[in-house]
Structures are given as C-alpha cells and as structure tokens.
Image (cartoon, grey):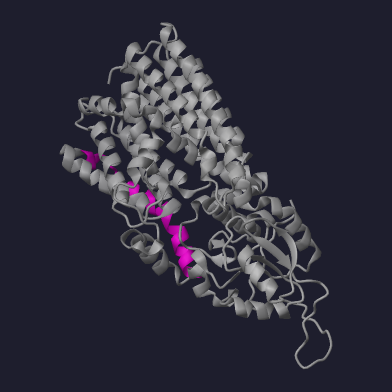
Amino acid sequence: MNDTPTRLPLNRTTILLLVLALAVIWFVPLGWRHLLPSDEGRYAEMAREMFVTGDWITPRYNGYKYFEKPPLQTWLNALTFAWFGIGEWQARLYTALTGFAGVLLIGFTGARVFNAATGVFAAIVLATSPYWNLMGHFNTLDMGLSFWMELTLCALLLAQRPNLPTANVRAWMWVCWGAMALAVLSKGLVGVILPGAVLVLYTLAARDWAVWKRLHLIGGLIVFFAIVTPWFVLVQQRNPEFLNFFFIVQQFKRYLTPEQNRPGPFYYFVPVLLVGFLPWLSVTFQSVRHAWRLPRQPNGFAPVTLMLVWTAFIFLFFSASHSKLLSYTLPIAPSIALVIGMYLPLVTREQLRRHLAGYALFLVVAAFAALFMARFGNARNPTELYVEYRSWVLAALGVAFVVTLFALWLNRRSRAGTLGAVASFGAAWLLLGTIAGTGHDVFGRLSSGAPLAPAIKAEIAKLPADTPFYSVGVLDHTMPFYVDHTMIMVEHPDELAFGISVEPQKWVPTVDAWVERWKADRYALALIPPSTYDRLLKEGLPMQVVARDSRRVVVTKPATVAAPASGASGAATQDTPAPDAPAPVEKPQQ
C-alpha cells in the first residue's frame, strides 16, 4: 500500500526520540508503588516461591499447589528475581516489557503492512491509551497474554504480505505458531482457541480460502507442540490431579459457569473500552469507516477484515462469559490502535484542533469533578486517603491540560504538523495515567500491608526457622511476599481450595482447631482480621501484637506462655509445629 502523507517527516531520529521518551516514562515508575492485592501480590509471591524452592514445574502459591494458570509469567518473574533481586519493580518488569514491546510491535507491523505513518501513529495510540498503559504497569497475566496474542496477529499479517518470498512467509508463520504456544503457556487454551476461531470467521467473512495454503500447518504445529508440550507432560507426571483441574475446571467451567463469582452484564466491557481508549474516542468511528473502505491486497488477503473480526469476536467471546474481569478484552487493544493509526495521518488541522480543544475542556471538567473525591471515603478507605489522592489526580489533570495546550499550539504551526500535535496529546494522557497511577499508592500502602513487614520480619528472625505462621480466616495476597514467608491457611481456603484439597494436611479447617493448636505451639505467628482478633482477645487467647493496621493484625505467641506437655505437670513446651504444617518458604541470602 502507498505511504500516507503526513506534515512531519518520519525520520529515524524522530522515531528514536519518541521511543526513548516513552521508555523513560514507561519503566522509571515501576517501583514507585506497592503491590496491590490480589493479582500483583499473588503472581509476585508465586514467582518468589518458585525462585527460592527451585521447583520450576509445580507452581505454588502460599505453599499450596496452584494450577489455575500456566507458568510462563511465573518463570520469567522468577528469573527476574534471580537476576535483579526480589522487589516490586522486578515483579512488574515482565509485564512492563511485554507492554512496551507490544507498542513497538504494532508500530513495526503498521509500517510494514500499511505505511510508515500508520505504524508511528498506531504505536502512539496504543502507548497512550489508558487501557494498555495502565495494564502494562500491573503484575497481571493479561498483558503477557495480550502481547503473545498480538504477536500471533501481527506475525500472520506480516506473513500474508503480497510478493513475500516463501522463506519469509514460513518464518513469519513459525513466529505466529510459536506466539500462540507462548500465549497458551501464559493463560491457557484461549491462546489458541481465539486466534483459531478468528481465522475461521475471517475466512468465511472474506471468502479468502487461499490463506490456508500459506499457514505452513505442519511445520507450525511442530513448533507449537514443541513449545507447549514439555511442561504439561512434566507437571502431569508429578501431579496426577493436574489435567482435570486445569482443563475442565479452570478452562471450561470458568467460562461456562458462574462458579468464579465474577459476574457482569453482557455490556460489561463497553465502558471498559470507552475509558480505555478515551483519548481517541472522537476519531474511532471515522477510523473504522476509513479502514473498512481500504482495498484487499493483490494476493486477496484482507488485513483490515482480519483485524475487525479479531476485535469483534474476542470482545463478544468475553462478553458472553460468566467470568469477567476488566483486563480480559485487552488482546483487542493492538488491533483497535492499528485501525485508529491508519486514520490519524489523514485528519486535517481543523479536525485535530477541534479534537484537542474538546479534550482540553474535558480535562477541566474532570478536575472540577475530582474536587468531590473526598465523598467516597469509608471505613476501609478513610476520607483522608481520598483527600491525599485528590492532590495527585489534580496534578495529573493539570499536567495533561498544559501538554494538551502545547499540542494545540503545535497544531497551529505548519512545520510541527500532525505528528507533533498527536504525539504531544498522547504524552498528555500518558503522563496523566502515570501520575495518577503513581499517586494511587496512597491506597496501595494500606492494602499491601508493606509498612508492617519490617516489624514482622524482625520478629520472624528471632524465632526458629520452622515456626508456623497462620493466616486465620483470610488470605492476604501481598503479605507473604513482603515478609518472605508463606502462611498456613485457617478455616477460609479462598482460591487455595484446590491446593488444600490435594494436600489437606497443610491447613487448619476451623478457627477452634487453630486455637487449640495455637495453645500447643511454643512459637507461632498469626495474621488475623481485626474483628477476629478482638473476639479472640476477649476470650483470653494469649497473643502479643507484632504489627497492625486497619485491615490486619499480626500476633505472636507470648514467650511467657508455654503449653503443658501431655502426661506431664508444669510448663513443659512443644519445640516444633504440628507435623502437618507446610514448610515456610523463606528468602535466600542475596
């Protein structure tokens, strides 16, 4: 396809400066926030346990077998810990790298399949859309999955270019098959089911049967299974219960039934996408209309049709699911960005002026609305936190407003043109998300429990290595990571129910049973919700507070209290925890 003209030369220096600026804003803040429950704490702790135990086959969470998801991200996070130490930015590094790589990949694909301007503008759209930007800075599985699915889509688009040598087609298709395999190792069967269904639907919609002759099925399947098979075989050999739980419970029941208690209406993802692509909503309709009118390639392949089918099917697939989370539709973000990126170089100066002026007004209205944030305060998140966060939000909106005004000024200058104005406007939203996201740590400090960790670790250091640490009636997703220690679940299994079912000796089924064990232990620690702590204190259970906040109380067994040994008088003590307690997973010396 012919290059689309733009009012600013797309030279390598300009593109390199944009990439470097993005890299600074993208990676520097990774360690500025505490880990949030539940996803960030869960996946960081799983990687920590994998690293310190050396078991790279059987994923564990809080000491229990955890087969809800495949291990690719856990492997890479554990490697990050091995190379750079255990910490918050290290836990987010893989997610950030895949998000950043996704921006570069969509730029490269847009430039090669369409034209240079499309590639640059598509990369700007993806990098600055809140959906992709914010998800790229949280330690969840969906960004990794989305990158590998994006690579699947982009490799297919790159392989189907006309007049491409056969060796190049084969190489790109092998990349496509390999990316699907890594998507499966990221989050399961969706990594292959969704691309496969999209290809079938594209074939029917475009009546492009010839594309199947260029998929290199035999070689591709060899690549796919060579990557996917080893871990599934090894984990099943070591854990006979794996296949049924992973495929039947997690892959099919999760989608088809409401067992996961993550319901949502069919339109659940509509507001997600509206907010996720908020900076570019005013040009979305025109972008789709422009893309739809583009002709097929000379070889009959229709890349725009494939992208639109990809977007529509994945959106509808997750909309129909009984289990919904905000990040599930993230894999469609790159295709949306590419469609918008095809249109942006064509907007006139007047169209862009109206776009920028409208968003400048929006930022002013948003700042006025932010003044009322304090009204959201409650017992769990006090008003003071909202007041503190309001300052961050107002600062973020102020910076975005100023940069948007700069984009308006650039748009008036013929030499700066479309790219300068669009890049500046994108930077406004990128900075808005970065500043407001960083400020969210006023809530993250409390929810993570990290401020309590030094006192707890100091107490652990005083006790024998086999001292049990109980989690009474609650699963705290972040505390095990921050204190470098797993916990024994009491009464409430939460999402560890499967691991407990296959290793029932590793938990305490009731609080009453735990109370008896606590009385018998010579040394012990426990994390308890404040309400439960108050009740147990009134009942006279011996406890000494180590650290506490509004969400959790961590206690130790008082040193002066000793349990009587069976058949003996006096204050005989028990030196070891009960034999069914899981061994603690502690941080090795760095």
Quadrant (top left, top right, bottom left, bottom right) of the N terminus: top left
In the displayed structure, 240 sits above or below 391; it is below
User: Where residue 301 appears, x then y in whole percent?
Assistant: 22, 33
The residue depicted at 46 percent of the width and 72 percent of the height is 240
User: Where residue 383 appears, x then y in whole percent?
Assistant: 58, 45
User: Where residue 515 appears, x then y in whole percent?
Assistant: 66, 78
Residue placed most toward the observer, 253 or 274: 274
The residue depicted at 43 percent of the width and 53 percent of the height is 187
Q: Is residue 227 magenta?
A: yes
Main secondary structure along the magenta-highlighted residues: helix
The residue depicted at 54 percent of the width and 70 percent of the height is 492
Q: Is residue 343 magenta?
A: no
- Residue at the far top: name it: 414
The residue depicted at 49 percent of the width and 24 percent of the height is 428
Residue placed most toward the observer, 346 or 275: 275
Residue placed most toward the observer, 372 or 26: 372
The image quarter in which residue 241 lies: bottom left
Q: Is residue 537 left or right of residue 253?
A: right
The image quarter in which residue 117 lies: top left
Residue placed most toward the observer, 467 or 212: 467
Tell me which segment is drawn in magenta: 211-238
User: Where residue 560 appears, x then y in whole percent?
Assistant: 83, 74
Q: Can you see residue 308?
A: yes
Q: Is residue 505 left or right of residue 219?
A: right
- Residue at the far left: name it: 207
